[in-house]
Image (spheres, rainbow, N blue to C red):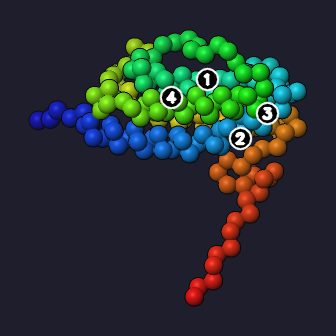
Amino acid sequence: MATTQQGPTPEFATAYRDTMLMGLTNELQATKKVLAAVPDAKSDYKPDPHSRTARELAWHLAAADVQMLDETADRKFVLGARFTDQPKTSAELASWYEENFLRAIERVRAMSPEELLTPDFYGAFTLPVFYYLAFVNNHSIHHRGQLATYLRPMGAKCPSIYGGSYDFPWQGTKAEPAA
């Protein structure tokens, strides 16, 4: 005889949210470095005619991440761009991203367990909204990696993301000798 499975508990939703927000906050710094590394004079670069330009990709990465966090806090996902005033330079975009990403994270952090358990995603999925924090994480990492591959062909240096890069090698630390 099959038994009914219980859905996620309020305690699970809160713990999952807190864990994801900690990870997203850590990822923010790497994403911000990649956004800032796009050379403004070459931001129209794209590796293929079917690709987005570096500027388009950087804006999509930043705006969609913040939009998905805001929509999680709103408990309603809406197709279409939420942000239309795109920053003019890569430095401005990195700053815009950090400011708005942290603002949106605080909105999600303020959600009650009941709000976290609200189901909606563009009317297509009915998972509780806290599950979509993984979508934000995956979206950000995916497009950050994509944008990082644009940097060297544009003549820019690729920042360290998870440790050193060729352009910014990890120096490590010397371990203290055992006493």
Q: Residue at x 45, y 41 (%)?
A: 20
Query: In what element is the residue under mark 2?
Result: helix
Query: In what element is the residue under mark 4?
Result: helix
Query: In what element is the residue under mark 3?
Result: loop
**Residue at the disc numbered 3:** 38
User: Which numbered mark, 2 or 4, is in the foreground of this view?
Assistant: 4
User: Which numbered mark, 4 or 3, is in the foreground of this view?
Assistant: 4
Nearer-N-terminus badge (4/1): 1
For the residues bearing labels 3 and 2, Cβ distance under 8 angstroms: no
Query: In what element is the residue under mark 1?
Result: helix
For the residues bearing labels 2 and 1, Cβ distance under 8 angstroms: no
**Residue at the disc numbered 4:** 104
Residue at the far left in the pictured view: 1
- Structural distance between the alpha carbons of marks 4 and 3: 24 Å
Q: Quadrant of the N terminus?
A: top left
Q: How many labels were placed on the picture?
A: 4
**Residue at the disc numbered 1:** 63
**Residue at the disc numbered 2:** 33
For the residues bearing labels 4 and 3, Cβ distance under 8 angstroms: no
Q: In which quarter of the image is residue 158?
A: top right
